[in-house]
Image (tube, grey):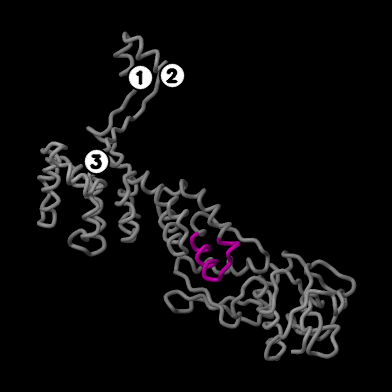
């Protein structure tokens, strides 16, 4: 195409002139010296409309030129060299949404792929898609999972209306599609709102999906938010069906933390055994076994463990339960984290402090004054977490 090929405006508008015999979705250049330059217009609902230049650049101009059977664009102008059209009308998101819903006059079919098989195709208009996507619209596809494929239409409709609805269960699907298509604005907005969903899913499926998505895009802040929630609710997580579906990486990340809230370390060991069995492993993977804090398991429970893979770890547990800290000091210096208690809620690491215990000591004026008994009924759980200073 010639120089000064494309002129675009900052508002989407339509000229009122009706054009009989035109095909819906047709594109033309108006106001130029010949058919190779001018202002871009598209024919929709019986009228020609000037296309907005928001989000447009030379890449979009290439799309238009190829649709007009030219090899490509030479320049995309944003000044009114070819005029702004007469009798303008705003063509809003509502009408564009209706255009998408009508499935009429499409010039591109987007395949929805599930395990490399096309589950459906979505009828769309390349010119509208090119407003937001920098990819070649002729080769666009949605590669997703079976549980997310039903939301592909909602995702494509966003290009027409600039609005998208999502729920706790659909947010991970929308996030993946937006990431694959490079829609940073949608990614950021959905990710921010999704943080509010973390406490609303007792099944832990959403938290798991959000964490995997955060890993996929390298969002360390979102990863930490998700894994911290899982850590603080670790006992419920281990008991849930979602536990055996967690990835190896997520289980390893959890076991590496000291803020897991569980009754005792034995609960973690039993949980990891069950996770490994669900994955088809007869024993716990070595990388995970090293992260279980055997010294914090009581001697009676250590004695009950069967299997040669536990022998070396049981020995460390017995040493910690019987030897003095002075004797263990070299080991503590070498692997301090291994001997650090998590947040255990069972005895002897935790105790409940309530109004009944206060009443027992009501004669001790200093104690009752400091507690002040602001309520007749109260209960607090006190967790004991010793730490070691080895330097």
Camera-nearest residue between 125 and 345? 345
Q: Which stretch appears magenta? A: 172-187
| Residue located at (66% from left, 70% from top) | 101
Residue pointed to by mark 2? 375
Secondary structure mostly seen in the magenta stretch:
helix
Q: Which numbered disc covers residue 390? A: 3
Dot 2 or dot 1: first in sequence order is 1
User: Which part of the image, by quadrant, shows the N terminus?
Assistant: bottom right
Horizontally, residue 153 falls left or right of residue 61, namely left
How far, Cα to Cα, is label 1 from label 3? Answer: 38 Å
Badge 1 density bin: few <14, some 14–19, many ≥20, Cα 10 Å: some
Badge 3 density bin: few <14, some 14–19, many ≥20, Cα 10 Å: few
- Farthest residue in the right direction? 86
Dot 3 or dot 2: first in sequence order is 2
**Is 156 above or below relative to 27?**
above
Residue pointed to by mark 1? 355
Q: Position of residue 307 (x, y in %)?
A: 11, 55
Queried whether the magenta region covers residue 186, the answer comes back as yes
Q: Position of residue 137 (x, y in %)?
A: 61, 79
Queried whether the magenta region covers residue 93, the answer comes back as no
Whether label 2 touches label 1, CB < 8 Å: yes
Whether label 1 touches label 3, CB < 8 Å: no
| Residue located at (49% from left, 60% from top) | 172
């Amino acid at each position: 195409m010639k120089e000064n090929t494309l002129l675009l405006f900052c508002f989407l508008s339509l000229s009122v002139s009706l054009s009989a015999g035109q095909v819906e979705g047709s594109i033309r250049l108006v106001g130029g010296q010949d058919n190779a330059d001018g202002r871009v217009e598209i024919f929709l609902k019986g009228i020609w409309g000037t296309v907005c230049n928001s989000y447009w650049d030379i890449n979009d101009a290439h799309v238009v030129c190829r649709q007009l059977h030219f090899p490509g664009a030479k320049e995309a102008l944003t000044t009114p060299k070819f005029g702004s059209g007469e009798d303008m009308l705003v063509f809003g998101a509502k009408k564009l949404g209706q255009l998408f819903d009508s499935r009429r006059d499409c010039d591109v079919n987007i395949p929805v792929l599930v395990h490399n098989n096309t589950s459906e195709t979505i009828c769309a208009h390349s010119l509208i898609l090119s407003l937001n996507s920098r990819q070649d619209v002729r080769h666009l596809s949605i590669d997703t999972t079976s549980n997310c494929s039903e939301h592909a239409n909602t995702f494509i409709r966003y290009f027409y209306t600039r609005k998208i609805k999502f729920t706790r269960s659909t947010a991970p699907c929308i996030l993946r599609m937006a990431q694959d298509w490079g829609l940073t604005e949608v990614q950021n907005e959905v990710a921010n709102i999704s943080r509010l969903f973390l406490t609303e899913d007792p099944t832990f499926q959403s938290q798991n999906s959000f964490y995997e998505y955060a890993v996929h895009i390298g969002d360390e802040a979102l990863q930490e938010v998700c894994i911290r929630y899982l850590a603080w609710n670790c006992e419920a997580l281990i008991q849930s069906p979602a536990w055996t579906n967690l990835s190896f990486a997520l289980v390893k990340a959890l076991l590496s933390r000291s803020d897991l809230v569980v009754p005792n370390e034995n609960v973690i060991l039993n949980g990891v055994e069950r996770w490994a069995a669900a994955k088809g492993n007869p024993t716990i993977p070595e990388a995970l076994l090293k992260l279980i804090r055997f010294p914090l398991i009581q001697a009676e429970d250590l004695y009950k463990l069967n299997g040669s893979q536990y022998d070396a770890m049981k020995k460390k547990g017995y040493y910690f339960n019987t030897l003095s800290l002075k004797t263990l000091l070299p080991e503590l210096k070498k692997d301090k984290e291994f001997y650090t208690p998590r947040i255990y809620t069972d005895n002897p690491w935790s105790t409940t402090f309530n109004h009944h215990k206060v009443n027992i000591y009501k004669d001790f004026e200093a104690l009752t004054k400091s507690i002040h008994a602001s309520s007749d009924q109260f209960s607090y759980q006190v967790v004991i977490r010793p730490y070691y200073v080895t330097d």
